[in-house]
Image (cartoon, rainbow, N blue to C red):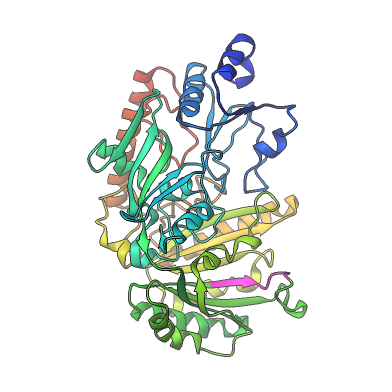
Amino acid sequence: MEADAATGDQFDEFESDFLGDLVRPGDPDYDEARGVWNGMIDERPAVIARCRDVADVMGAVEFARERDLLVAVRGGGHNAAGLGTCEDGIVIDLSPMNWVDVDPDTRRVRVGAGATWRDVDHATQAFGLAVPGGVVSHTGVAGLTLGGGYGHLRRAYGLTCDNLVSVDLVAADGRVLTASEDEHADLFWAVRGGGGAYGIVTAFEFEARSIGTEVATVETWHPIEDATAAFETWRDFVESAPRTVSGEAIVWGVPEDPHFPAEYHDQPVAIITAVHAGDPEEGEELLRPLREFGSPLFDFSGRTRYLKLQQGFDPFFPAGEHRYYQGSVYLDSLDDEVIADILDRAETRPDPRVLYYVWNLGGAIADVPEHATAFSGREHPYLLAIDGKWDDPAADDAVLDWARSFKRDLRAHSPGDEYRNFPGAAEADDVEPRESSGRDETVERLVELKDEYDPTNLFSRNHGVAPSEAARTDGGAGDA
């Protein structure tokens, strides 16, 4: 059912009890309000409910449930597949709920579901603290956390969801629940890596880490001709480095940015990076061998303010201005053959702004037992991520075909699984995972919890978790 069908007295009643703003087609700010980070997503919701508080979220959920409306939930709007919006339905927009409360004594941080990592970093760094978050600061806290959360501190302190203490959530039936290890523990298990299929999280409580305000980093940019040696050097370094070190090996084109000489713009490069979560002086010494590799074109290494590190790539991935694709595949290893296959794609990228990179994993990520949370993939040593960026709609097929074929070809070195937050374009045929009893066990449990908390699939715009057929029949309403 379309939200346009809810007009007259019904809509007026909803609006009269709503503290935030309701934006509809024809309103002056409608086009701005419906926009998300990925410029290739062009959905036109019938109403955007900008919620200011939990009561607004409850009211929006009730309004949608009673009218069987298609529902999308938006935090930061950063999901590349466009799950934070929908056509003709209701977008429950949490962005006004962007508050952050820090208790420096207990190192507990409560965060509203509309906050971005820039909001969290700003509040926590005032006390020398950090919640392990993402690597682009305008990413929403909600989506990243619910899908797992890889960042610069991942090997030292784990995934973002591993630092989660509790959530407040509005369920499909309108109940407000607190989920933690002690309350609704099954739901708490699901929201740590299982996505947003079970309700709308309105607040997150995290344990922050004492990291100070400065970290040691390596970031050297090398000619693509040196890519093989750069990747192999990076691999050898990170495989023997302590868990305080997290890094990426990247293939990219030099951005058309005034910080880079014009003669280098769009040239393919190999970038090797590492971040040390600990004493900066010790980190500089530890990272020195990696920094000394080769003759880089650019060297941005050294002590760096954590806030600057978190915002370093922000200018290159602005919201709404470009078309984006994010895909991924875990790797079983990063031996010389894998590196050769990865670098074979460097010169065929369909746009110089398309980049791909390898993350080293393990450390604190792997300390958590596989089934302790809904996150799957802790055992993998590496993740390959693809960030497509382009402007011309006519190039859509070329970019998507290139990314999908890249992932298919790498499956020879991979279990086939993907990171939930980099799901491609949510296409079912992107990469078929291999048989995995552990993964199947997690999926089965996620479906059981979906049956319990959202049997009618009100929150259908999620990462592929749907209720069982039996629950749909018993629930009566079917797909929203």
Q: Is 301 left or right of 282, judged from the image as shown?
A: right
Image quadrant holding the N terminus, namely top right
Q: Can residue 85 be seen?
A: yes
Quarter of the rendering containing residue 348: bottom right
331 over 300 or under it: above or below? above
Q: Position of residue 60 (x, y in %)?
A: 51, 25
Q: Position of residue 92 (x, y in %)?
A: 54, 32
132 over 216 or under it: above or below? above
Q: Position of residue 125 (x, y in %)?
A: 46, 61
Q: Is residue 357 magenta?
A: no
302 over 447 or under it: above or below? below
Quarter of the rendering containing residue 202: top left
Quarter of the rendering containing residue 477: top left
Q: Position of residue 319 (x, y in %)?
A: 65, 51
- Tell me where the magenta segment starts and ends, as one range: 250-257
> Between 226 and 53, which is closer to the camera in this rendering?
53
In the picture as drawn, the residue positioned furthest to the top comes out as 9
Q: Can residue 444 be seen?
A: no
